[in-house]
């Protein structure tokens, strides 16, 4: 990703930090410094954010390692102010595999929360930690609250969160991959609208979350449509992407030489599938 600083490599996967993440750290440091006048408090705030995003990196590697189990590689992992992104070469086409890959990330946060809860229980601080939330508790208690929040947020049944992929995997068994994607993307955009409205009245940060969810849901649906167009291989038929040499009208008959992979008969019709034209043999 452009504008990113390489932090290192884990399991053979490069890990990057986007420049805007530095802006988040600077904002946290300055806001705490101005609020308290203490460099120690400001530094603690920066360290806490860094540890949170360490948990985010572990979350992403949960996806990465689960995908690797099914022979799916990962290009890189990038830290952004709104979270992390693991760029897999592809998503599993088997709904069961996608379900496992999608749940692997939140499962890491559940494990982290379990370790933190065990530590607080061991030290006798669990009772005070339960009511502390993110602000006001100890470092471990606050980190526990954050990991629980990450699990809840990521499992919302809408794209581009992991819960959207879980929903798609469950629906795909019944109605197919593309219709399941459309449903999850639609729910995602509905949630984005709710986040946006909430951001106007409560927390402006939710507006940025709304933008992220809105465009993420739309992108996921568009990519899935393109995959359906590029990968169409039905019994008795053939599909390929069209390279129009002139105006293309949906449903018209075209010559085979203007498609990426000519079908056996040499003639077919074009149809609009999302942002691309797809050729199908008659």
Image (cartoon, helix red, strand yellow):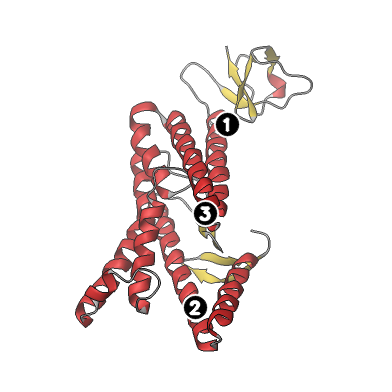
* For residue 228, side relative to residue 115 (left or right): right
Q: Position of residue 239 (x, y in %)?
A: 57, 23
| N-term mark: 2 or 1 | 2
| N-term mark: 1 or 3 | 3
Dot in front, 2 or 1: 2
Q: Are marks 2 and 1 in contact (CB under 8 Å)?
A: no
Q: Is residue 94 visible?
A: no
* For residue 147, side relative to residue 205 (left or right): left
Reading the image, the residue beneath label 2 is 45
Q: Quadrant of the C terminus?
A: top right
For label 2, count other residues whose C-alpha is less than 10 Å away and answer few (under 14), some (14-19) or many (20+): some
* For residue 143, side relative to residue 182 (left or right): left
Reading the image, the residue beneath label 1 is 230
Q: What element carries label 1?
A: helix
Distance from Cα at disc 1 to Cα at disc 3 = 36 Å
Which residue: 58% across, 48% down? 211
Mark sitting on residue 206:
3
Which residue: 40% across, 38% down? 168
């Amino acid at each position: 990703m452009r504008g990113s600083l390489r932090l290192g490599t884990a399991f053979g996967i490069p890990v990057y930090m986007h420049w805007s993440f530095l802006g988040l750290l600077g904002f946290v440091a300055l806001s705490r410094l101005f609020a308290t006048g203490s460099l120690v408090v400001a530094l603690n705030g920066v360290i806490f954010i860094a540890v949170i995003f360490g948990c985010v990196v572990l979350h992403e590697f949960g996806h990465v390692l689960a995908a690797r189990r099914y022979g799916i590689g990962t290009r890189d992992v990038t830290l952004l102010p709104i979270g992390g992104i693991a760029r897999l070469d592809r998503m599993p086409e088997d709904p069961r595999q996608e379900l496992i890959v999608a749940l692997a990330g939140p499962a890491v946060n559940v494990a982290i929360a379990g370790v933190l809860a065990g530590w607080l229980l061991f030290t006798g601080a669990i009772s005070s930690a339960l009511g502390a939330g993110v602000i006001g508790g100890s470092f471990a208690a606050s980190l526990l609250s954050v990991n629980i929040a990450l699990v809840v947020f990521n499992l919302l049944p809408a794209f581009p969160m992991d819960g959207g992929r879980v929903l798609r995997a469950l629906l795909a068994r019944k109605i197919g991959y593309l219709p399941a994607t459309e449903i999850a993307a639609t729910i995602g955009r509905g949630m984005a609208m709710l986040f946006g409205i909430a951001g106007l009245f409560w927390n402006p940060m939710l507006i940025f979350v709304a933008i992220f969810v809105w465009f993420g849901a739309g992108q996921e649906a568009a990519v899935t449509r393109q995959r359906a167009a590029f990968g169409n291989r039905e019994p008795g038929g053939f599909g390929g992407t069209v390279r129009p040499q002139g105006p293309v009208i949906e449903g018209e008959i075209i010559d085979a030489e203007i498609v990426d992979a000519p079908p056996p008969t040499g003639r077919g019709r074009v149809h609009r599938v999302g942002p691309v034209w797809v050729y199908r043999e008659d």
